[in-house]
């Protein structure tokens, strides 16, 4: 496995965390999420995002409501549930912990 | 010159070139195949169709009414391939460590099995909503398309005369699964998958959407689309709003009562319920035969039917809290654990044993009741005659 492939796997695993982070900031619909991700290394597509969002909703991390759009039919706007916020907080903590561990190990 | 095919993507018509249509169909079919077994398959597919429709819409204008093949393939490339849901298991190493809620969540996710395949036949489930004991009769009635009361009477009949009803009931209570998800409930009464589709959409918040619309025209347009789709599904809806939707809130969960405690008191409540049932039957019989209730003579100016009615209401008043308590115990016990069949078995056995014992004792030690049972055929005959003469007399 090349370094690049390893990064791909890492990004894939982190996508859920990144999506949680985006939805935590404001109510968004899928095109917003894609737009926010596109300049980053987490750029993704509907084909990946929809199954992920539906899985996260099933796990009770997020919820959605229908809202009218200026043009066209109403859209699903996603927002975090209490459980989703909890998971985001825990993941952030864990992430910081990993960072700290990496730094500490580098200094030894 | 290319042939054009008109398609309906979630309520909007689009005209596609034939090869573009083939590409879209292939994409959606692959998506459906990859999402097979995913409990949200239909919802994700619907989301994807919405997204594709949104990509097509800005491509069209006054002088361009057809989505050409290149545009279809470009839109599909933008959508990207459908990545199958990795399932309730942690997404990967990175997410795994930081999700202590993982096991519980995977429990809820795994509990909902894949929706039955489209147009699937009926399936036998136990239906706890409106059940008396474990929902066997309720489920059987839904399966056979009969009134639950008739099925219950059949079971009681079998239980009294040959005892087979008890055995059959207990076996079925253990073997037959309980209908929990809306899909299972739909399958229990054999509703086609359009019913599931309907429930899913309705749940998705069509009505929420209507409420949220500030502008009347948009609301009307939305409503019209909704109605059109409902008509297209040819679904008779009044029925399922109750059956599949309302789930009684677990009344005891808030009290935090321990499950062992509930499992312990459940048979006792059942016994009480059984005793009240028997008392009611005895009282009614004694009222009808010698004309008094446990030695208490009926006042002369009260007709017998009024007394029967009063008895019935009294019985209802006494039995209602007991029934509610039993229901609450079932709900409080929550998700079936390994001990669940045992508890149900114990409950059903205790209940039936008490009923049978009381009946036997009553018939053997109360001469009136003994006589009443002896006289029952004659009584029925007489009642029939009375009705007939009453009918003729009119």
Image: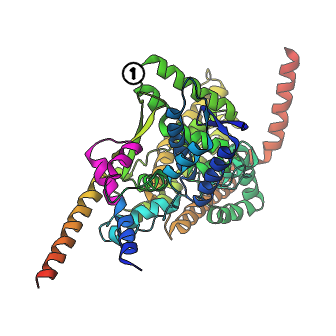
Q: Nearer the viewer, residue B296 or A58?
A: A58
Does residue A28 belong to the magenta stretch?
yes
Q: Position of residue A62 (x, y in %)?
A: 37, 49
Who's the residue at 17% across and 76% down the image?
A101
Q: Quick one: which residue is furthest to the right in this view?
A: B392
B2 relative to B263 in the view: left or right: right
Q: Position of residue A27 (x, y in %)?
A: 32, 41
Q: What type of secondary structure mainly makes up the magenta span?
A: helix
Who's the residue at 52% across and 20% down the image?
B220
| Residue B298 visible, this angle | no
Who's the residue at 69% across and 53% down the image?
B363
Q: What are the residue bounds of the magenta stretch?
A: A16-39
Q: Quick one: which residue is furthest to the top in this view?
A: B394
Q: Position of residue B37 (x, y in %)?
A: 59, 60
| Residue B88 visible, this angle | yes
Above-or-below relation of B124 to A97: above
Who's the residue at 42% across and 24% down the image?
B213
Q: Locate the C terminus of chain B by quadrant.
A: top right
Above-or-below relation of B25 to B88: above
Q: Which residue is mark 1?
A: B214
Above-or-below relation of A104 to B19: below
């Amino acid at each position: 496995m090349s370094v690049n492939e390893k990064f791909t796997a890492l990004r894939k695993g982190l996508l859920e965390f990144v999506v949680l982070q985006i939805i935590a900031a404001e109510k968004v619909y899928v095109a917003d999420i894609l737009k926010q991700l596109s300049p980053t290394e987490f750029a993704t597509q509907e084909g990946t995002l929809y199954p992920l969002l539906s899985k996260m909703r099933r796990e009770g991390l997020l919820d959605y409501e229908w809202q009218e759009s200026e043009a066209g039919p109403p859209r699903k706007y996603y927002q975090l549930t209490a459980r989703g916020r909890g998971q985001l907080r825990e993941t952030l903590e864990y992430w910081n912990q990993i960072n700290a561990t990496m730094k500490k190990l580098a200094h030894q | 010159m290319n042939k054009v095919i008109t398609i309906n993507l979630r309520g909007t018509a689009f005209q596609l070139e034939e090869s573009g249509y083939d590409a879209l169909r292939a994409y959606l079919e692959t998506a459906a195949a990859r999402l097979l077994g995913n409990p949200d398959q239909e919802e994700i597919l619907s989301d994807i169709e919405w997204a594709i429709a949104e990509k097509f819409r800005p491509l069209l204008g006054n002088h361009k009414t057809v989505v050409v093949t290149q545009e279809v393939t470009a839109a599909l490339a933008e959508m990207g391939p459908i990545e199958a849901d990795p399932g309730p298991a942690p997404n990967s190493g990175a997410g795994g460590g930081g999700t202590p809620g993982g096991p519980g969540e995977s429990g809820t996710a795994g509990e909902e099995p894949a929706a039955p395949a489209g147009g699937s036949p009926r399936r036998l489930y136990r239906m706890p909503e409106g059940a008396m004991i474990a929902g066997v009769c309720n489920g059987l009635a839904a399966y056979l398309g009969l009134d639950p009361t008739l099925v219950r009477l059949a079971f009681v009949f079998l239980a009294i005369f040959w005892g087979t009803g008890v055995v059959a009931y207990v076996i079925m209570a253990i073997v037959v699964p309980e209908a929990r998800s809306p899909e299972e409930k739909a399958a229990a009464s054999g509703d086609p998958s359009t019913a599931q589709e309907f429930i899913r959409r309705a749940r998705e918040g069509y009505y929420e959407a209507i409420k949220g619309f500030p502008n009347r025209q948009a609301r009307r347009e939305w409503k019209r689309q909704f109605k059109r789709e409902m008509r297209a599904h040819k679904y008779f809806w009044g029925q399922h709003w109750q059956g599949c939707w309302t789930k009684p809130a677990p009344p005891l969960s808030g009290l935090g009562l321990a499950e062992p405690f509930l499992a312990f008191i459940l048979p006792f409540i059942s016994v009480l319920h059984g005793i009240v049932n028997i008392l009611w039957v005895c009282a009614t019989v004694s009222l009808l035969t010698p004309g008094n209730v446990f030695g208490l003579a009926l006042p002369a100016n009260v007709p017998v039917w009024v007394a029967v009615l009063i008895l019935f209401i009294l019985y209802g008043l006494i039995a209602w809290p007991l029934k509610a308590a039993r229901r609450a115990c079932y709900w409080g016990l929550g998700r079936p654990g390994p001990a669940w069949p045992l508890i149900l078995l114990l409950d059903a056995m205790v209940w039936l044993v008490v009923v049978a014992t009381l009946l036997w004792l009553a018939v053997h030690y109360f001469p009136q009741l003994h006589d009443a049972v002896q006289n029952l055929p004659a009584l029925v005959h007489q009642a029939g005659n009375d009705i007939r003469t009453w009918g003729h007399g009119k």
